[in-house]
Amino acid sequence: MLNQMPVGMEVMVTSPHVLATSAGARILAQGGNAYDASIAVSIALGVVYPHMTGPGGDAFFLMYNEKSGELSGYNGTGRSASSVTREMFEQMNMISIPSRGVLSAVTVPGMVDAWWEVSHKFGRLPWDKLFEPAIQYAEKGCPVSHNLHMWMIRDEAYIRADKEMTSVYIKDGILLAEGDLLIQPQLAHSLRILQSGGKEAFYKGILAEAISVSVIQDGGFLQKEDFEKHTGEWVTPVKTTYHEYEVCQMPPNSQGFSVLMMLNMLENTTVSSLNRLSAPYYHLMTEVIKKSFRDRDQYLTDPDFRNIPLDQLLSKPYAKQLWDEVTESAEEATPFLSQAMGQDTAYAAVVDSEGNAVSFIQSLYFDFGSGYMAKNTGIILQNRGSFFSLDPDAANVLEPGKRTFHTLMPGMVMKEGKPYLLLGTQGGEGQPQTQLSILTAVLDYGCSIQEAISLPRWVYGRTWGEDGDELKLEQRFGIEVIQQLEAMGHEVRPLGEWDDVMGQAQGIMIGPNGMLSGAADPRGDGAAIGW
């Protein structure tokens, strides 16, 4: 299962689908830079990986500009409808926001705005050119990938429940099979509208009108005025040091700071002294994760609505306090429960010949998002807002015009002021955990980026919307590891050797001689291309 690692001296692109990677490579070959290529990849993913992402979702871009030496981020997440309140759901006798259907689509999609802003600040090629690969895939068709087909089977009930989705994914009453041609004429038409009309078409023009009319007709909350008011945000990334490296993440409402907290705790020990495939390693990682998630769940929401004490949470003295808590029960699992969350996400990365680097991630939240496709658009709306709480005392309580707690977190590691590692993954709760696995593999154990992604992984907690306090492990080691973890008090669930529950990670490593190493997860349909 270990993929051969592509290398290059000029450019590198990686994504969870080979056709999306090819779209980025095509743009680079046509003279585009990393920003142009990242947007082309992002648009294409919405066509070839529609169960994971699309223009009805959100996105984060973490970027390094070689000319200015600036590290910047763009938060392309949407806010809740201005008319929606938690009381509305309570009046419908609901204790939580539905995870599917039009009522789950309570936030404006922010992805198209992110494409526009990144393109117009940093891009080189004309906006319309970035859409050409994706439109070709949508109009002429692309083969149903293994991963897409797997999720179509799992979500067949949601697909059949929505007339618009049925028209795309079902032919003659039967789900499209793996390898069948997926043709999306309505999505292609929407992309052509964006190609010629820019973001105005999505937030103030014909698509804003079409989506909002469809949603309101079907009993939802998003109105055209919500689209018109939308704007993303240029942000300053959050950072911590780990050994001689600087690890960078997106600030809240992203959960990115949680992995920085984990690294701060781990600086109090020598991680490489533990066998990477041993019970003590998995136990330590899990306990560090729990301490970080406890604070994440207490504070994380839209920082415009609540103060999030990042300075304290990311301080080394506070990390030492948490570390002391970990060592107090050095060989005993501690209980922790967080809210179940979705995992449908697509991460990709691009480095160009000038040294610009873009680490970006996008999502519909759950697989096929809300399961609601706005009429005559081909656009599936995200259900990201379903993660809002209806508890008035919760930090992430639903309020009008608010961004929710966001699982998306593209990562970048700097060494001597330059990008060294770009990384990210699918995964809800799994995103910070998989990043921790990759980061420790590379920074502590000296692995290549492909080796790091291919190592046996774990996921603790409730990702994929599951309930439970269990530790899921890919079983590529002896049963004694599981037995030792169970003796420590962990509820262990062994998985397959290469399990899709672990999601799909991608990464790029930049060596001291400028050599670019790209990696795509062998658990998925992705590829890295470089030269």
Image (spheres, rainbow, N blue to C red):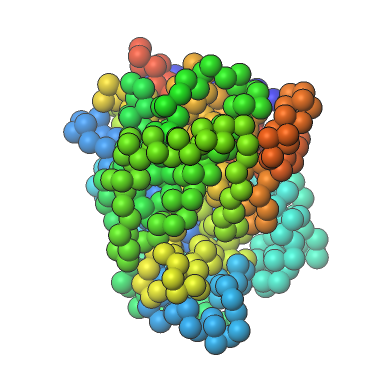
Look at the image and tell me in which quarter the C terminus lies: top left
Residue drawn at x 67%, y 73% is 163
Q: Position of residue 52 (x, y in %)?
A: 58, 52
Q: Tell which of 257 and 220 is nearer to you.
A: 257
Q: Is residue 424 positioned above or below 84 on the image?
A: above
Residue drawn at x 41%, y 56% is 300
Q: Position of residue 367 (x, y in %)?
A: 62, 56
Q: Tell which of 482 and 390 is nearer to you.
A: 482
- Residue 197 quadrant: bottom left
Q: Position of residue 47 (x, y in %)?
A: 55, 52
Q: Tell which of 260 and 280 is nearer to you.
A: 280
Q: Position of residue 71 (x, y in %)?
A: 27, 37
Q: Is residue 531 positioned above or below 351 on the image?
A: above
- The answer to whether one can see residue 426 in this image is no
- The answer to whether one can see residue 334 in this image is yes
- Residue 316 quadrant: top left
Look at the image and tell me in which quarter the N terminus lies: top right
The residue at the far top in this view is 513
